[in-house]
Image: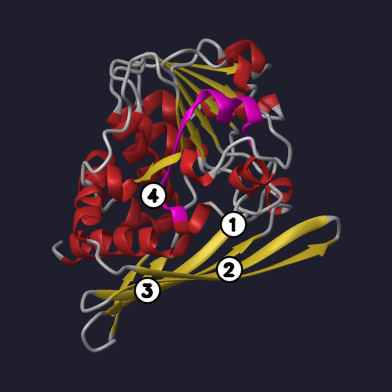
Amino acid sequence: MLMLDAKAIHNSLGFPALVEELEEMHLQAECLADELLMESIDQSQNVNHFFIRTGWQPEEAVGAKVITIFPRNNQQKIWPSIQAVYILFEGINGTPIACLDGTALTYLKTAADSALGGKLLARKNMKTMLMIGAGEMAIHLISAHCQIQPSIKKVYIWNRTQEKAQALCQGELKHRFPEIRFESVESIEENVFQADLICSATASTRPVIPGRLLKEGSHLDLIGAYTPEMREADDECFRRSSIFVDSRTTTIHHVGELMVPLANQIISEADIRAELTDLCRREHPGRRADNEITLFKNGGGGHLDLMVARIIHRHCSQK
């Protein structure tokens, strides 16, 4: 069985190749099952989460990711808030073939998922990005979007504690993308209207993105809300946007980002125009006009973990 640590996973392939292969996987993915077991415990004024997420593509592969999310780890700065391990099984006889660092897999899968959504939905020749949240996911999301959208020349970064945003601006990103200007900002509202691409990865339970200020033609990439209580975009974001998801199964009835506006009749399920598989197969055209605002909800899922784990395993097995 192949053992793949975080370094091996991050060095397996770059985002352009990963996004291209993930798009191809969506063309092949028939009967790809996804299951989720989740427990949450309010412990010491922090809600900790434990997930088991599985994916099964018959005759191809089976996989399971075991995840813990302990938000207080961010404050202690000893351990990541998200930690996981992933086991990949061969699909014909059920033999385990790889054990992957699940945290690194989650970072790459999540960022590639959003970047693929941006590739299929965002307006071409975008110049400016606003990253909301400077947690562990931020560097991967920024890297993925900037590699898939090379026209981006300026990235604003907002975080609840500005020091963290400043550190992200002055760190590895500056060396990865010397042609891009990175700037920490104190206000979301003052920068939303300037951004062609808004990417949000926070743990917020209240909307932080004001839809009234969205720029015409912008693309909104929502990652953070993964429980029924969590939201990042306000109702006006949904009223003004063409709405897309990576998977209807893992988003519509599972995350507050969609559950709340659906329950309040701000939108209906019919307003969710397509999921990634529809877009990859060109069964939906995606963006129809340059002035259209597109909203993509990245909900993840065991099927995406399985796709990316298979891609990484194939590349690492060939080395």
Q: Position of residue 102 (x, y in %)?
A: 45, 63
Q: Position of residue 243 (x, y in %)?
A: 46, 35
How many badges with numbers are in the image? 4
Dot 3 or dot 2: first in sequence order is: 2
Amino acid type of the residue tagged 4 in the rendering: Leu
Q: Position of residue 50 (x, y in %)?
A: 63, 68
Q: Nearer the viewer, residue 140 or 244?
A: 244
The kind of secondary structure element at disc 2 is strand
Residue hosting label 3: 63
Residue hosting label 2: 51
Dot 1 or dot 4: first in sequence order is: 4
Dot 4 or dot 2: first in sequence order is: 2
From what the image shows, is residue 274 above or below residue 221?
Answer: below
Q: Position of residue 117 (x, y in %)?
A: 36, 38
Q: CA distance from mark 3 to mark 4?
A: 16 Å
Q: CA distance from mark 4 to mark 2?
A: 18 Å
Q: Nearer the viewer, mark 4 or mark 2?
A: 2
Q: Quadrant of residue 17?
A: top left
Which segment did they paint magenta? 232-248
> Does the magenta-highlighted stretch encompass residue 46?
no
Amino acid type of the residue tagged 1 in the rendering: His
Q: CA distance from mark 1 to mark 2?
A: 13 Å
Crowd rating for badge 1 (residues with CA inside 10 Å; few <14, some 14–19, many 20+): some
Report the residue at 28% width, 22% height from top.
150
The kind of secondary structure element at disc 3 is strand
Q: Quadrant of residue 33?
A: bottom left
Q: CA distance from mark 1 to mark 3?
A: 21 Å
Crowd rating for badge 2 (residues with CA inside 10 Å; few <14, some 14–19, many 20+): some
Q: Residue 254: which disc? A: 1
Q: CA distance from mark 3 to mark 2?
A: 14 Å
Dot 3 or dot 4: first in sequence order is: 3
